Amino acid sequence: MKLLTITVPCYNSEKYMRKCIDSLLPGGEDVEIIIVDDGSKDATAQIADEYAEKYPSIVKAIHKENGGHGSGVNAGIENAEGLFFKVVDSDDWVLDTAYQTILETLRGFAGGDQVLDMLISNYVYEKEGEKRKKVIRYKHVLPENEVFTWKDVHRFHKGQYILMHSVIFRTKLLRDCGLKLPEHTFYVDNLFVYEPLPYVKNMYYLDVNFYRYYIGRSDQSVNEKVMIGRIDQQLKVNRLMVDYMVSKKQLLSSQKKLRSYMTNYLDIITTVSSIMLICSETEENLEKKNELWKYIKQKDAMLFFKLRYGLLGSCTNLPGKSGRKVTVEGYKLCQRFFKFN
């Protein structure tokens, strides 16, 4: 069995996937790299096969019909032979020194008495044209270099949530919790780091800048104009997260800190949905915003209250054109601060 499976979902990634894969190869024989060619129309499939042929004991190439990012992650989980599992997007890469620290830490749990469900590390915004890189770290929020549970976690700041870039899960946990991401849908990485959480018991945090998250492509899914164009997919993920939160209400009833974290994360996602709908400046999308909030209220009145009358919910529901203007200006301020695309 491999120590770590790293899945690289690829769609028309010929221009940048080599940098990603080359950064993963130093993991050596402990690592399994699964390149998932999601029905690409460029040279992605050939590049994947090239690496699989050159490194047959490390790299595996999977070719499938196009199903979207979530479908690629699903294929990785289904075929993973590693004890632990990570997703690295094809336009991102990892830092070798941090990589080796992470592998050394994971080795300490392989075959040991203590089960590790989730390892967290830092990620870095590699934003095009900016020399100063913003690092998202979890110092003072998560205990360092020791196993801990949700009871030991402190309060997360806005913009400091656990994202796909920062997390490594135990593979069996992902399978046991039944995680299956929707196909042909963007923004499912939010579900990837949300749905397994009620099943995560033991965690470990390393204060190393492992994942390098590239921002700058005009067609990137986090580009504001692209997000507005794909707003129905954002709303789909948003609703699925609401449904999941409601379905796990009983399971979360005794886990106050985890429940609070998941509510706050949902607050962020709902705020992004609302602001994108406001930024589009169409009556149709403003109605979609109202429908989203009605949906949440119908599903769970208490959850609606927490989201609607929290700080972020209040900002996205200010009345009239002047209220919407304040909301948009506030979002632009957040863009500059958090380095959003």
Image (spheres, helix red, strand yellow):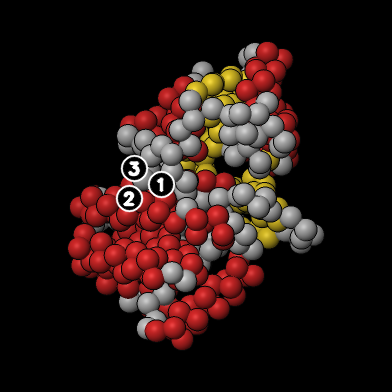
**Could you give the CA–CA distance between mark 1 and mark 2, rounded to whole angstroms?**
8 Å
Q: Nearer the viewer, residue 139 or 333?
A: 333
Residue 52 position within the rendered picture, expressed as x and y whole percent measured from the top left = 65, 17
Amino acid type of the residue tagged 3 in the rendering: Tyr
Instruction: Label 1, secondary structure: give it.
Output: helix
Q: Position of residue 189 (x, y in %)?
A: 47, 46
Verify CB contact (< 8 Å) between mark 2 and mark 3.
no
Q: Is residue 203 visible?
A: no
Horizontal relation, residue 150 to residue 37: left or right? left
Residue 258 on image: x %, y %:
36, 56
Residue at horizontal 40%, vertical 29%? 172
Image disc number at residue 240: 2
Find numbered disc 3 in the image and state the secondary structure of the residue it sits on: helix
Q: CA distance from mark 2 to mark 3?
A: 18 Å
Relative horizontal placement of residue 279, taking residue 53 as reference (left or right): left
Give the residue type at disc 1. Leu
Q: Which residue is labeled 3 in the image?
A: 199
Does the residue at mark 1 contact the one at mark 2 (Cβ under 8 Å)?
yes
Q: Is residue 280 left or right of residue 102?
A: left
Image: 180 above or below 37? below
| Mark pair 3, 1: CA separation | 14 Å
Q: Residues within 10 Å of mark 1 (few under 14, many from 20)?
A: many
> In which quadrant of the rendered view does residue 335 lie?
bottom right
Image vertical order of residue 93 relative to residue 138, above or below: above
The residue type indicated by label 2 comes to: Leu
Q: Which residue is mark 1?
A: 191
Q: Is residue 169 visible?
A: yes
